[in-house]
Image: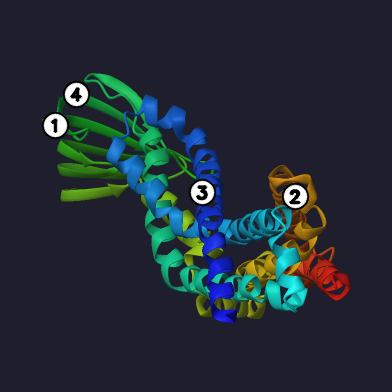
Amino acid sequence: MMRILDRYILAELVGPFLFGIAVVILLFEGSILFPLINVIVEKHVPAMQVVRMLLLKVPWLIVWAAPVATLFASALTISRLGRDNEVTCMRASGLSLRRIFAPILVAGLTASAFSLYVGERVVPRAEKVANRLMTEMYMEQSIPDIKQELFFRTENYSFYLGAVQRQPGSRDIAVKDVLIYRLPQGDGFPLLMTAKYGESRGLVWEFRDGWRVEMDRSGKVRLQHHFERETLNLKRAIEDFWMESQRSEEMTLNELKTRIDEFTQGGLPVSTMQTDYHLRLSLPLSCLVFALLSAPLALRFSRAGSFAGLLLSVVLGFLYYNTIFLGKILGANEAIPPVLAGWMQNILFGALGLVFIATSE
């Protein structure tokens, strides 16, 4: 009898949980896509590249969506059971509310374990590729419209191209009679390069048969030499920046902990990374916390109908995400300890859940 009841309640949770996951993912995917619209349209980014990037973001979004989906499923299920007097029948048969809520807590614990696994095993690899694709989209803006017999400037270089030929079916170009100035970091004259031929591959340029000339502060030639091949990687500075600013979701927990230790030994600020570390642990556990909170709370409003369960999910979800964002801000600015900043939402909603469970009978 008890197993039948447990399966019945768990079956009621599946549909709303999956629906909640889908809704949150769609909302977050929109927030990722809309800032890229101008880049996608202006630079003619291939549709498949955009679709691939959005799909690679799904694992990360599942981790963020799972707690609210658990809340949504629990609230709607208990609201429906309470409204149709099924909870009353269960209690009349001798079951306590805590026993009735047990399958929901098991579902929350299962969702927490699944979310932790996805966040640790799937998200780092997917995020690295997704963020690389996003970087490539933005870097497309650094490729100027290049014409022959014209000067143009990109990064710290100024170019003059005598002739330009675009490669068939590609944005890459072949150039002839090239004059290049690399602007100085401080006072002095720029480095001068000339080349008979050159090719671009994205932001990587290779020049052939040229001369490299360096001048001193007075403008006299200090050094000149002939080269057969010379490569300019204008992408390197951007890639180095992205590597150094690797986001926490691109690392496993062990990698993030190692990065924190390295920064701590170097005397660098680590409050943001420490907050992210604790948040990586607390987010999955939020599924269990919401299962603990939403079931007794939804029962109190079950007589108001399904709309009450939906409204309860929206309000608690809004408070949940804003509590996380507030904790990240306070933790990053060292207003509160990182461990408190990362676990603040679970402490708050978990305490409320325990109170409601204790008083539910």
Dot 3 or dot 1: first in sequence order is 3
Most foreground residue, 5 or 332: 5
Which of labels 4 and 3 is toward the front? 3
The residue tagged 1 is 169
Whole-angstrom CA distance, mark 1 to mark 2, is 54 Å
- Circle 1: is it few (<14), some (14-19), or many (20+) Cα within 10 Å? few
The residue tagged 3 is 25
- Circle 3: is it few (<14), some (14-19), or many (20+) Cα within 10 Å? many
Instruction: Name the side, left or right, on which 284 lies relative to 255.
Output: right
Q: Which mark is residue 312?
A: 2
Numbered-mark total: 4
Dot 4 or dot 2: first in sequence order is 4
Which of labels 3 and 1 is toward the front? 3
Q: Which mark is residue 162?
A: 4
Q: Quadrant of the C terminus?
A: bottom right
Whole-angstrom CA distance, mark 4 to mark 2, is 67 Å
Whole-angstrom CA distance, mark 4 to mark 1, is 22 Å
Query: Which secondary structure lies at badge 2?
Result: helix
